[in-house]
Amino acid sequence: MFWSISTQGAVAVVGFDERLTRFLPNFDYHLINLTRDPDNKFSLLTSAYAQLTAGLMKTIRQKQQLRQMLADLSLVLNKLVLDMLGEQFVKTALLYVGYGSGLTKIEVLAIFKNISPKTEDVIMSAFEELEVEYMEKGKQQTTLQHIKGMLKLGMTPNFIAAAFDLPLETVNEYIKMIKESQA
């Protein structure tokens, strides 16, 4: 939408004190509704100043909307962490953001902490669980590589179990995994 309005019309619309109108320049004001599809309406603005002002207003409005969305998200997260299912959902969302965004652990932690300080404990426990899981997987991979090497040297499953202080059935599971990966 595009409207042209005189100084007197602008005064009437804004509700400006009539006694001060003599100090206003006699311009024709052009009002453009930028609430819908503002990018396409920037071309209607003829001066760089007007385009810059409109761009700044758009950015401010977007930041206000983002702030409101984050405040709403904070309320939701604070309610979710009050029960186990909600807490699990927050952990899953955290891991999804961490994996999907390429952000570091510290960046994800900072984002979630800024959104809702109450979720900090949930976030920290999720990261701790993830670290334990990675350590376990790393330990398992190392054990798997060692068992594979010992099998190549001709050692028996009983000897390997004794060397690693593992139950024989665990060693046999590792041997099965090795054979399946080689097939």
Image (cartoon, rainbow, N blue to C red):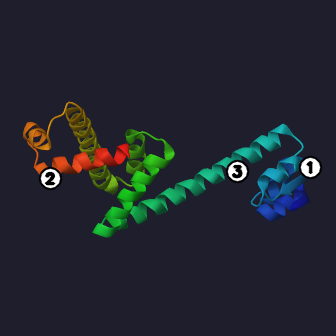
Give the residue number, with chain letter if any, for mark 2: 169
Q: Earlier in the sequence, mark 1 or mark 2?
A: 1
Q: Earlier in the sequence, mark 2 or mark 3?
A: 3
Pick the residue in front: 131 or 156.
Answer: 156
- Looking at the rendered image, the disc whose residue lies closer to the viewer, 1 or 3, is 3
Q: Amino acid at mark 2?
A: Glu
- Looking at the rendered image, the disc whose residue lies closer to the viewer, 2 or 3, is 2
In the displayed structure image, the side of residue 138 where residue 28 appears, left or right:
right
Quadrant in which residue 139 is drawn: top left
Pick the residue in front: 183 or 165.
Answer: 183
Label 1 residue SS = loop
Give the residue number, with chain letter if any, for mark 3: 58
The Cα–Cα distance between marks 1 and 3, rounded to whole angstroms, is 28 Å
- Looking at the rendered image, the disc whose residue lies closer to the viewer, 1 or 2, is 2
Give the residue number, with chain letter if any, for mark 1: 26
Q: Residues within 10 Å of mark 1 (few under 14, many from 20)?
A: few
Q: Amino acid at mark 3?
A: Lys
47 above or below 6? above
150 above or below 117? above
Q: Amino acid at mark 1?
A: Asn
Pick the residue in front: 21 or 96.
Answer: 96
Label 3 residue SS = helix
Q: Earlier in the sequence, mark 1 or mark 3?
A: 1
51 above or below 81? above
In the displayed structure image, the side of residue 163 where residue 50 appears, left or right:
right
Q: Mark 2 and mark 3 in contact? Answer it, CB < 8 Å.
A: no
Q: Position of residue 173 (x, y in %)?
A: 22, 51
